[in-house]
Amino acid sequence: MESIAAVVFFVYGLCILSLSYGWLKLKRQPILHASLTPRTRVSVVVAIRNEEKNINLLLKHISDQRYPRHLYEIILADDHSSDGTLSVINKWIQESDLYIRVVHNAARDTGKKAALRNGINKATGTLILTTDADCTMNECWIISMVSFYEKENPRMILGPVLYRTPGNKVFGHFQALEFISLQATSAGSASLNRPLFCNAANMAFSRKIYNELRDPLSSKTVSGDDTLFLLAIKKKHPGTIRFNKNPHAVVETLPKKNFTDFWNQRKRWVSKSKYYRDFDIVFVSVLVFVTNLLLSTGAVMMFFNPVFMNYVAVLFLLKLLIDSCLLFPFILYYRKHHLLLSYLPSQLVYPFYTTSTALGGRLLGFEWKNRSYHVN
């Protein structure tokens, strides 16, 4: 077992250090220079369902964008909301100068993907930006993404998504650190031209590439409107996906308030993994799972045999050091220094959480937006 663990951790170390190198070699992109005139028409598409508590803040942040009003529109794609969401939106339409369009899922169509397809089909922009209803962003979000698009001309742009973690919330900090690990992996892998993940809460793509793909949002699965879309572009147009490192491009969202919501969200994320056919993402996913399985199994075994205590301690410290090479530069760059204090306790929990989530997402159903889904 020791020799297997040595090989696994050696490969894991090489993988994480490669991603760290990818992150460090990314250049910070400047905001579009004041002397230049933006020319790209943008459609911000948001799938919504029962977002009465969130939609007002989102529209406020989009309203504050420092981008010419005539060059962007907001498409709110409603998935059968039954609360006061539409009333809030109608008030904005009546009282603001934002160009807001509301489109509704047909009675037979349900789910986020159906809403996104509906919204994107109605969009008029050359560049499509997607985000979620519970998100907030910097006033230069649109212009930073457009600037990157006009300079680099990528098929897809991945933007940073971070959690807002008010106060000293232990659970929130754990979620924030785990999310940062995904974001750092997304950034590092994209920099190496081998993108692995993305998040639809902050994603941009050309209308042309969307129309070019047969099923860009992968309608066969509930989740995966982001990563499966990315993998389709990666396969057809390798080397055309970029990560926008600019701090102005950050989108923030809130962590889950309770474990049930958190557990359902993570199971939903993992549920799409059965459709992965890309070597890079399958390899990294299996490697991370096996690494954490070795740690969690060893931790359980040491209660039955003290010999495993030294084994687990060495592996834990090794992983702690390896992961810090990727996470710390990302944390410091986006000024999330307060999360460093939670790094050690989070790492103690992470192997057990990762193993159980990987298994739960493949074997168990989940709930999302008051709907139940089963794993096929």
Image: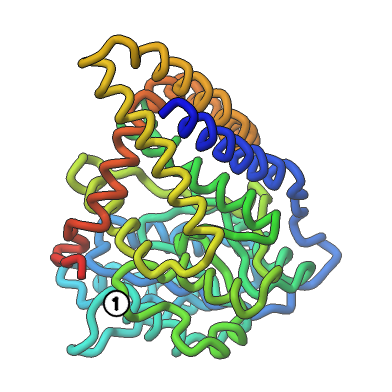
Q: Viewer-proximal residue, 34 or 132? A: 132
The quadrant the N terminus occupies is top left
> Are there few (<14), some (14-19), or many (20+) residues within 10 Å of tag 1?
many
Colour pattern of the rendering: rainbow
Q: Position of residue 214 (x, y in %)?
A: 48, 89
Q: Residue at x 79, y 72 (%)?
A: 37
In the picture, measured across the screen, residue 45 lies left or right of residue 139, that is: left
Q: Position of residue 193 (x, y in %)?
A: 69, 61
**Can you tell which quarter of the image residue 122 is in?**
bottom left
The quadrant the C terminus occupies is bottom left
Q: Viewer-proximal residue, 258 or 197? A: 197
Q: Residue at x 57, y 29 (%)?
A: 322
Q: Residue at x 17, y 45 (%)?
A: 260
**Residue 188, placed above or below residue 202:** above
**Residue 75, placed above or below residue 132:** below
Q: Which residue is mark 1?
A: 78
Q: Position of residue 181 (x, y in %)?
A: 50, 41
**Residue 305, placed above or below residue 165:** above
Q: Position of residue 33 (x, y in %)?
A: 81, 60
Q: Is residue 334 visible?
A: no
Q: Is residue 62 visible?
A: yes
Q: Residue at x 20, y 73 (%)?
A: 81
**Can you tell which quarter of the image residue 107 is in?**
bottom left
Q: Viewer-proximal residue, 299 or 17? A: 299
**Residue 376, placed above or below residue 287:** below
| Amino acid type at mark 1 | Asp
In the picture, measured across the screen, residue 176 lies left or right of residue 358, that is: right
Helix, strand or loop for disc 1: strand
Q: Please state the total of marks drawn on the protein image.
A: 1
Q: Viewer-proximal residue, 371 or 85? A: 371
